[in-house]
Image: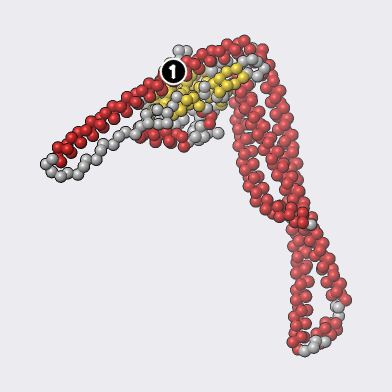
Amino acid sequence: MKKTAILLIIFLASIGVFAQDRDKMERDRAALQKELKEIQSVYNKVKGETRVNLGQLNLLQKKMAVQNKYINNINGEIKHLNNDIYLSTLELNRMQKQLDTLKTQYSRSVVYAYKTKSTYDYLNFIFSANDFNDALKRVAYLRTYRVYRQQQVENILQTQKEIELRKQQLLGKKNQKSSALSNQTHQMKELEDQKKEKDVVVNKLKSKEKELGKQIADRKKKDAQLKNSIAAIIRREIEARKKAEEEENKRLAAIEKARTTSTTASSSTASAPAASPAKTRTTTSAANIPLNEKEVILSNSFASNRGKLPHPVDNGYVSIPFGPYKVPGTSLSGDNPGLTYTTPSPGATVKSVFDGEVLSVFNLGDGTQAVTITHGKYFTTYSNLSGVSVGKGSSVKTGQAIGRAAADDEGGSGGKVDFILMVEMKNVNPGLWLRR
């Protein structure tokens, strides 16, 4: 009995939590369905290409990862439904026992009323009172008893309605569970099909390991060149800022010296208030890169938008993630200094992910260009551009177009953009800063 009571308390306390969890799961499921649809739309455009590349494989792997999340979401829904069904069944059993008790009590009162139903018995009960007050109490008791019987009937009817409602709710939950299980089976089949499709792509890549190896070697060479160019740009910027800082400090020191001399001279002839010292320029950051007040504000604003920055391209997808990666089924591996985006077609607009100033526009030696933008102590680089719409020293805003994506040089029919993020001289994962 105690165990049942405890479970019922848990049930009542969990109703609100389950409702919140279900709402969140439904929102997550809708987002996952949308993401799967978008990935499938892009994949449909590349899966028919005769020349299989890493982008296809990574896109398929991403789709499988989202599919797994979708299945886990359905599993969570089934788990919550099982809990709801179990606790609802306990509550329904409790209410049925309560109804049985009410009916038993009512039947007893009906039997008693039947036995004492004659007017003579009622009158005899009243007139057998010891005094007038006792008679009034007996009349009041009879009235109360009639109200009690009416209340019993109302309680029985209300409990019956509540039981029927609970049964309908329980049936609805069971139907939800049946639908969820059916969806789970369908999504599991989808995942199995995706695994088979992945195996086909992996086998194709394996059969072209030599060609793919050359692509990765070329990419490593190009990445090294790009990283060296970015490092040189940032070093020049640091030196320029340090030089500007030194010159500003010299200027301020000269002003301070002049003020001190003027104050000393005037103090010999008249009493004068001491001159306030000239303000020094606070420009240092955590890693020796000078920042003026405006750059400090910009850096802090960039940092506060971690995980919220827009992607540099619309309708594109990350075909090669940041960091070390291996090609399944082969001995090949690579190390991406940023995120590689594939766009549906060359010429897609490339946008700045945050406010800043263009530090450099440079050529990569293969007919493509790159743009490096400073955001205080943060630096973003957009490479493999077929055209650039900004110049060195240009101020840019978040989402402003800075160029166009060049064609994919690794076998795809779309465009390609490499996006690199540096925090001072440190290469970091841009994916952690971009909007999920």
Tell me if residue 379 can be seen: no
Give the image location of residue 41, x and y in percent.
61, 27
Disc 1, SS: helix
Residue closest to the far right: 115
- Residue drawn at the location 39% of the way across and 34% of the way down: 296
- Residue drawn at the location 54% of the way across and 13% of the way down: 218
Quadrant of the image containing the C terminus: top right
Residue 426 vertical position relative to residue 276 in the rendered view, above or below? above
In the picture of the structure, the residue carrying the numbered disc 1 is: 229
Please name whichever residue, 387 or 327, is drawn nearer the observer in this view of the structure.
327
For residue 187, which quarter of the picture?
top right
Residue 54 vertical position relative to residue 269 in the rendered view, above or below? above
Q: Is residue 261 left or right of residue 174?
A: left
Tell me if residue 277 can be seen: yes
Q: Is residue 257 left or right of residue 151?
A: left
Give the amino acid type for the residue marked by disc 1 in the picture. Answer: Ser
For residue 239, which quarter of the picture?
top left
Q: Residues within 10 Å of mark 1 (few under 14, many from 20)?
A: some
Residue closest to the far bottom: 131
Residue 243 vertical position relative to residue 148 in the rendered view, above or below? above
Residue 289 vertical position relative to residue 334 in the rendered view, above or below? below
For residue 300, which quarter of the picture?
top left
Q: Is residue 108 left or right of residue 73?
A: right
- Residue drawn at the location 28% of the way across and 27% of the way down: 247
Give the image location of residue 292, x and y in percent.
35, 32
Total labels: the figure holds 1
Quadrant of the image containing the N terminus: bottom right
Give the image location of residue 379, x and y in percent.
44, 26
